[in-house]
Image: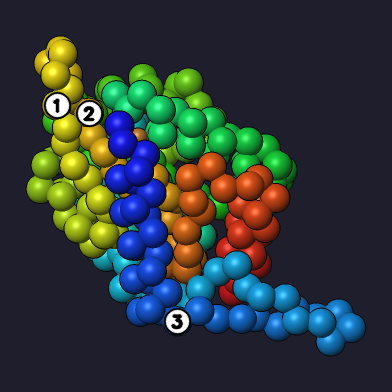
Amino acid sequence: MSLKTIRLATYVAIAAVIILGGATFALVGGGGLTKPSLLIAPTNTIGGPFHLTDQTGKPVTDKDLLGRPAAMFFGYTFCPDVCPTTLTEVGDWLKALGPDADRLQVVFVTVDPERDTQDKMKDYLTSFDPRIRGLTGTAEETAQIVKDYRVYVKKTHPESGSDYLVDHTAAVYLMDRQGYFVGFINYQEEPEKTIAKLKELMARG
Ligand SMILES: [Cu+2]
């Protein structure tokens, strides 16, 4: 898996969001000091309607996620590095948030529906925090969400063996409770900054 490609894809996506959404700064009370927001103004330039199924077989649409903020991550269960690392870190974030974590939804969407069946997702996610919801769907359904969320996905075939890998965007997408995109958590971002972003996400009305 090429981390270089993933990083590049992430930077391009972030640049697009900053240009489209416009960076915003929120005023934070206290002695007249202003603190720059870690998130951007809500934008619908990333995201869109989807229809998928979670690891328990329950249908999940974009509408089902409304009402609570969501952290969304795109990957696949066969992933050798980025996905297990991120899913482990997501568990750490939820622990760090304590009881507040109940107000956050965490969604792992497969970009490899060919191998990631509902059972495979269920099996795989038992290794991680049980609050993580894994979504899969048909090739068409997952292609739609990949397109609407501007996720970079590229199948690669190593020279040895028949198992393919999938290069994919490694950032975690932050969606507010109205379903608007408000920012990314980058791959292996510093925990303090990550938690600050999640807290800001949850504090938004
Ligand atoms: Cu991965």
Q: Is residue 151 left or right of residue 143?
A: right
The image's colour scheme reads rainbow
Please report the residue visible at 62 percent of the width from the left and 41 percent of the height from the top.
94
Disc 2 C-beta below 8 A from ligand 1: no
Residue pictured at 61% horizontal, 59% vertical: 197
Q: CA distance from mark 2 to mark 3?
A: 34 Å
Q: Position of residue 188 (x, y in %)?
A: 54, 42
- Tell me, for residue 165, which label it has, or none: 2
Three-letter amino acid code at disc 3?
A: Gly
**Residue 49 location (% of width, % of height):** 24, 63
Q: Are marks 2 and 1 in contact (CB under 8 Å)?
A: yes
- Cα distance in 3D space between marks 2 and 1: 6 Å
Residue 43 quadrant? bottom left
Marking on residue 22 = 3
Secondary element at image label 3: loop
Distance of label 3 from label 1 (alpha carbons) = 38 Å
- The residue at the far top in this view is 161
Label 2 close to label 3 by CB (< 8 Å): no
In the rendered image, is residue 172 in sight? yes
Q: Is residue 200 above or below residue 29?
A: above
Residue 51 position, x and y percent, is 22, 52
What residue did someone put label 1 on?
Answer: 157
The three-letter amino acid code for the residue at tag 1 is His
Is disc 1 placed on a helix, strand or loop? loop
Residue at the outermost right position: 31
Residue for point 45% across, 21% down = 126
Of the residues tagged 3 and 1, which is closer to the observer?
1
Residue 187 drawn above or below residue 56: below
